[in-house]
Amino acid sequence: MTPVTLLSRGAVVLLCCWVLLPIYLLIVNTFSSQADVSGFPKNLIPPMDTENVEFFMGYFGVGKALLSSLKVAAITMILSIGAGAPAGYALSRFDFRGKNLFRVFVLMTRAFPLPLLALPLAVMYIRIGLDDSVLGLAIIHTVLALPFAVLITYSLFSGIPIELEEAAWTLGCNRFQAFVKVIFPLVLPGIAASAVFAFVISWNEVFAAAVLTIENRTLPAFLLQSLGTSPLHLKFAGGAVMVVPALVFIFLVRKYLFSMWGIANR
Amino acid sequence: MHPRLLPYLLLLPAAFFLCVFFLYPFFLVAWQAFFTDAGEYTTEFFSEMLGHWKFEGALKNTLILTLIVVPIQTALALFMATLVSGMKKGRDIALYIWTIPLGISDLAAGIIWLAIFEQTGFLNSFLYTLGLIDQPQTFLGYQSKTTIFVAIVLAEVWRATAIMLVILVAGMGLIPKEYYECADVFGASRWKQFTRITLPLLKPSLQTALILRVILAFEVFAVVVTLGGTNLPVLMSEIYVWQFDLRDAHVAAAYAMVVLAISILCTLVIMWALRTPKEARI
Amino acid sequence: MAEINIKQVAKRFGKTQALHSIDLNVEDQEFLVLLGASGCGKTTLLRIIAGLETASDGEVWIGGKRIDKLRPKDRGIAMVFQNYAVFPHLTVFENIAFGLRMQKLDQSTIDKRVKRTSELMHIDSLLERYSGQLSGGQRQRVAVARALATEPSVLLMDEPLSNLDALLRMEMRAELKTVLAESKTTTVYVTHDQVEAMSMADRIAVMHEGEIVQSASAIEVYRDPATQFVGSFIGNPPMNFLNAKSSGNGEWNIEGLLLQGPSDRTAIQFAIRPEDLQLCGVKSSTESNTDQLIEPDKLHATVRVIEPLGSHKLASCKVGDALFRVVLDSDSSVSAGDVLALKPLPDRVRWFDPESNKAMA
């Protein structure tokens, strides 16, 4: 091994530690007793005390917030794939007037601070009765997730040779049948990945959730609201509850993270 | 149905959605910033915003944070992407670990770094064990703005470098290996290859990554609130305060216009600075 | 059982004219090859017949029925694609059965047809495999079996062999020819490979810049190219062309060679295939006085490069300022710099009009 490779190996390991260590420390805190959390100096091996987590889960409002979070994320997932996948398909398969305009439009949404949308929507929702509702929040989360859904599905559909579809047409399928029998089975894992991505975006979003909901707070909004008042150990347990699904999700979609951006820059 | 209409039909749901819940609300935000509830044009909300004692600090803090965080992240992401491009074994696992923060919200990231920086946190604990301090220090108190700032920078670099990394790794994946082999044959060093091949060909990806990252940096909110509380105001936290605690949506909208304006300005600057003619792309 | 009639089909992509008013008839059971360089419009024409592309103008008829407004599935065609388009999520069996299931045939008929076509294509042992477990050649066979299983009235093939390596391509060429001759299906086959075209076709339609420039049997296209393009595109090495000067009374002077030709022109081009030249003498480059060699019934070519190709030697020469290729016996001891005295075989000489580039009677 040359010194250069040794050095770069070392750098890779160091950077892995840089990412993992803070998460580990959070987990240590989460699985410590209340006394340990505020104790000093600290132990680096967690006592595996679940009292903290149990207390958090039983804490007033947490169960409801968790449920709201799941509901909002699920609706976001359905809406963003439902609207995004057809658009991704259209972009990958057709040449039409306005195609570039639409692509730029979708990409441009990323150039705007989207959480700001929460402000006018708060007013608009009161008028149409969507205020403080799970659906209302899911809609703004969909605006956040939709550009990604369009980009991921666009790259997915582009990755499937058009000849497969044409072959199905010549073998007796109409457009819809060809899609269902040939394209859909092939893109299904990717669609699932982009749905997971939409889920994560919604699961993590704080600002709009805090602005738009009062009764139906999602978990991040709940945590943010109670930051000032809740004791430390509760914050850590809440943080851990939020982080763990993220770890799983990123693992599930890791293959698709990169392909999406490969095509988006073309 | 005419086949030419099909693509438009497929775009309709997404386009409708973005128009109603993206374009229209932005129009509303602008309206709220410039017009009173009675519908009269006024700059009163902007004056109120500019006159407020926290505005200057919030703007300054946001800009300085962005100016510190984004260059560090760009350099780090480029370094990580380069490291990983030379790897065979362990590439996937390294990339997985490095992209974990992508799934972690700014709020959770704030809480994670709170565990390190709070008074009975791991940093104090570590320094104490080494014998460098006699008693726990207050890093995040109202007199210690500098350490709050450092903590926020660390948390932001930790959390949000991943998105740039993903875009840059994807971009590097599009550069054919042959270019580097060719450069090797001509005797170019690793550094020369990086500056003469990687960077120029990576410009479109770098552009996307920077735009995305800079805009997200202007939206920094939960990390700041978690670590700094109200001690370190930024634009987004002020919007939250005006909307909720002070119940004045108009001034909040005026703040939003400021965030929007600097976002658009930065996007345009980055687009111009890193422009690549279509013919010169891979 | 179907003939194809293409009537004045034109295709424009924006401002570019991909096809100029094509007229073409394919007989029932005929094997027609569309041959041309890339970008000549041959694939576009095939895709218009298939219904994957819409013609800007004109009509397409199959078996006496106008089909250009129908969807691909209603045209009675089957197609084999260049990259095979074998569905990766289905087994070989299900790939072959795909079209049959769409026709809603009963299971026993499907089993029978899949069995028959897979045996015909020698893939009956692979029926349970997926596309990813097959070699390129095997995928090719699945694609053909899948198309034939639907018993189409017209089979369309788009460069089906171009992704195979040379040896496999030769093998599949012969096999496809046998299978298709047995199935008696009207076939339109697109290729840019002239050897493939000549070896398989009942008739070749040579395309150039969106037009069919010649449509005839392989030997006719080779011997009597309708235009200069056909002469230089078909045949490897291509036909030689030289400018001729009139010396009156229908006699033409081609760089010293005097030949009787068409008499009603002022300018004309002489053409001959490289293998239709008789070597009458060699003047080595080491001998000094070359001018003694000039004879009026011979063409004098200065050798630039000799390429030994096994079965023969190819000499690239200069006649005047023009490039001129000659096929020589592999035993001939000619080297660069030598001057060859060549006598064209009289019945193989062709004449072209330099303005229209068309052959003259």
Image (tube, coloured by chain):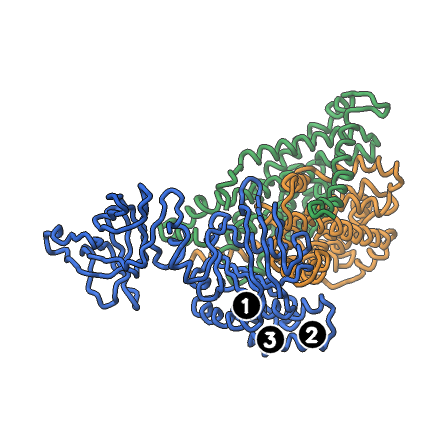
Chain colours: A orange, B green, C blue
Discs 3, 2 touching: Cβ within 8 Å: no
Q: Nearer the viewer, residue C299 or C310?
A: C299
Asked if labels 1 and 3 share a chain, the reply is yes
Q: Farthest residue toward the left?
A: C288
Type of amino acid under label 2: Ile
Type of amino acid under label 3: Ser
Disc on res. C118 = 3
> Which of the marked residues, 1 or 3, is nearer the chain's N terminus?
3
Residue A252 in view (yes/no) = no
Q: Secondary structure at mark 1?
A: helix
Is residue B151 depicted above or below A188 in this figure? above
> Which of the marked residues, 3 or 2, is nearer the chain's N terminus?
2
Q: Secondary structure at mark 2?
A: helix
Q: On what subunit does the disc labeled 2 rest? A: C
Q: On what subunit does the disc labeled 1 rest? A: C
Give how far across and how far down residue B167 sits, in percent. Answer: 59, 48
Give how far across and how far down residue B163 sits, in percent. Answer: 62, 48
Disc on res. B121 = none
Residue A118 in view (yes/no) = yes
Is residue C109 depicted above or below B234 in this figure? below
Type of amino acid under label 1: Gln
> Which of the marked residues, 2 or 1, is nearer the chain's N terminus?
2
Discs 1, 3 touching: Cβ within 8 Å: no
Q: To which residue does mark 1 refer? A: C140
**Crowdedness of circle 3 by 10 Å Cα count: few (<14), some, many (20+)?**
many
Q: Is residue B272 left or right of residue A165?
A: left
Q: Is residue B111 left or right of residue C171?
A: right
Q: Nearer the viewer, residue A243 or A96?
A: A96
Q: CA distance from mark 3 to mark 2?
A: 12 Å
| Image quarter hosting the N terminus of chain A | bottom left
Q: To which residue does mark 2 refer? A: C110
